[in-house]
């Protein structure tokens, strides 16, 4: 194979990879939204786990139901950080009562909390210890 052919093939492959990365960037940025979509006010809830901790995606998640029947989506830290805080998949069972602390979504129609801490069975899982 001629060296120029190899070089053109490499450039073509690199161009395709870059184009793919650029096409995915808005989706990744939207999924990893930081704290801008949440209130500055501290927010606490107590509820029953309906969906256990999942470490899939850019942030760990779980869901709880409060006594009034409302289901809340909890957005935790990124999976590695959540796991290193001791909160792993299977740690807190469905049906367990938990208390959470964080910041509610700015949209009052969205029942979502960017969660800093989860307390269960006397143990505090502080997934954002730098935000205390």
Image (tube, rainbow, N blue to C red):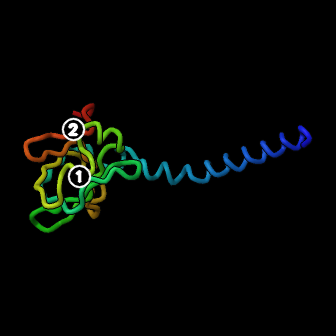
Mark 2 vs mark 1, foreground winner is: 1
Could you tell whether 12 is left or right of 118 in the image? right
**Mark on residue 42?**
none
Residue 21, position as x, y percentages in the image: 61, 48
Number of labels in the image equals 2
Label 2 crowd (10 A; few <14 / some 14-19 / many >=20): many
Residue 6, position as x, y percentages in the image: 84, 42
Q: Which residue is mark 1?
A: 90
Q: In the depicted view, which residue is nearer to us: 12 or 34?
A: 12
Label 1 crowd (10 A; few <14 / some 14-19 / many >=20): few
Seen at 23% across and 52% down, the residue is 90
> Seen from this angle, which residue lies furthest bottom?
69
**Mark on residue 126?**
2
Seen at 17% across and 48% down, the residue is 100
> Seen from this angle, which residue lies furthest front?
1
Seen at 92% across and 41% down, the residue is 2
Residue 118, position as x, y percentages in the image: 18, 45
């Amino acid at each position: 194979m001629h060296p120029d052919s190899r070089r053109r093939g490499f450039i073509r492959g690199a161009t395709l990879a870059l184009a793919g990365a650029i096409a995915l960037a808005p989706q990744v940025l939207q999924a990893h939204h930081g704290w801008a979509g949440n209130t500055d006010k501290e927010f606490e809830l107590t509820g029953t786990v309906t969906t256990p901790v999942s470490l899939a995606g850019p942030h760990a998640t779980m869901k709880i139901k409060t006594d009034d029947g409302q289901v809340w989506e909890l957005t935790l830290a990124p999976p590695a950080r959540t796991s290193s805080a001791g909160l792993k998949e299977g740690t807190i069972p469905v049906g367990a009562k938990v208390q959470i602390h964080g910041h509610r979504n700015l949209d009052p129609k969205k029942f979502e909390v960017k969660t800093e801490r989860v307390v269960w069975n006397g143990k505090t899982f502080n997934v954002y210890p730098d935000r205390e």
